[in-house]
Amino acid sequence: MKGTIQNLNINEHHCSLYLPPNYNILDVNYPVVYMNGDNNTEEIINSIESHFDVDCSGFILISIESKNWNHDFSPWPAPTLAKNREAFSGGAYEYLNNLTKVIKPFIDTHYRTKTEPENTVLIGYSLGGLATLYSLYLFGIFGKVGSLSGSLWYDGWIEFMSSNSPINTAAKVYLSLGKSEERSRNQRMARVGDCTQKTFSILSKQLISTENIIMEWNNGGHFTEISKRFSKALLWLMRI
């Protein structure tokens, strides 16, 4: 890895900040990728950095650690998936509002960023991927969104999409899912394949162009090659 990663705290959120190669040498501004959850930033960057300025734009990346996964990334309250698990408490609006009103302004103030929606990306995995899509219906600030193995089985999600419209209909959306994920023994989670395809269909009609959305199927289940799936998504979202 030629760029650098450092830790910082923004409004009590622990974040990892990646700055691309030559950030401290060249006086240029960069697109910014915001990542829901504390994912393996270094592994993701290692697999994509060589593509900068060839296949995709170089970018700043902010990985935001969740204080409470089931709260921060759930759009509204929903029952637990199992008796020994925590219920979903519906705190995604609170989290996304903090992201847009506090974290992004901090990054834009302290680092050389391109601030326009087309240069502002939100990406997430699992429930964090659901939250990225939810943001499309709340804020117009994210012009590129990636939902990887998103929890699109979530109670009421398809109904919500069907009765609302994205604020920024020019947004670009990347969806992906593992081919084995819909084989879950949990009846709610087993709906993820059907719900992901319905999500793709609905967004294809809501966005201004079908070229703005893609859906990719990956081999394996929910926990297969997660970093590789992030890299594939970022290469598409940040392509030159």
Image (cartoon, grey):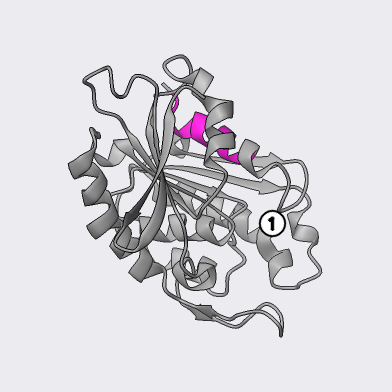
Q: For the residue labelled by badge 1, is the local secondary structure a helix, a strand or a loop?
A: helix
Q: Residue at x 57, y 40 (%)?
A: 230
Disc 1 marks which amino acid? Gly
Rendering coords of residue 113 (x, y %): 25, 35
Q: Is residue 167 above or below residue 171?
A: below
Q: Nearer the viewer, residue 100 or 65?
A: 65
Q: Is residue 205 visible?
A: yes
Q: Is 231 covered by the magenta stretch?
A: yes
Q: Is residue 48 left or right of residue 182?
A: left
Q: Is residue 113 left or right of residue 2?
A: left
**What residue sits 24% from the left and 58% below the top?**
102
Task: Name the foreground residue: 122 vs 191.
Answer: 122
State the residue lying farthest toward the front.
7
Q: Residue at x 46, y 67 (%)?
A: 67
Q: Nearer the viewer, residue 87 or 166?
A: 87
Q: Nearer the viewer, residue 129 or 182?
A: 129
Q: Percent from the top left, x then y, of residue 109?
A: 18, 43
| Start-end of magenta stretch | 229-239
Residue 142 drawn above or below residue 163: above
Prevailing secondary structure class for the magenta stretch in the rendered image: helix
Q: Position of residue 219 (x, y in %)?
A: 76, 41
The residue wearing badge 1 is 193
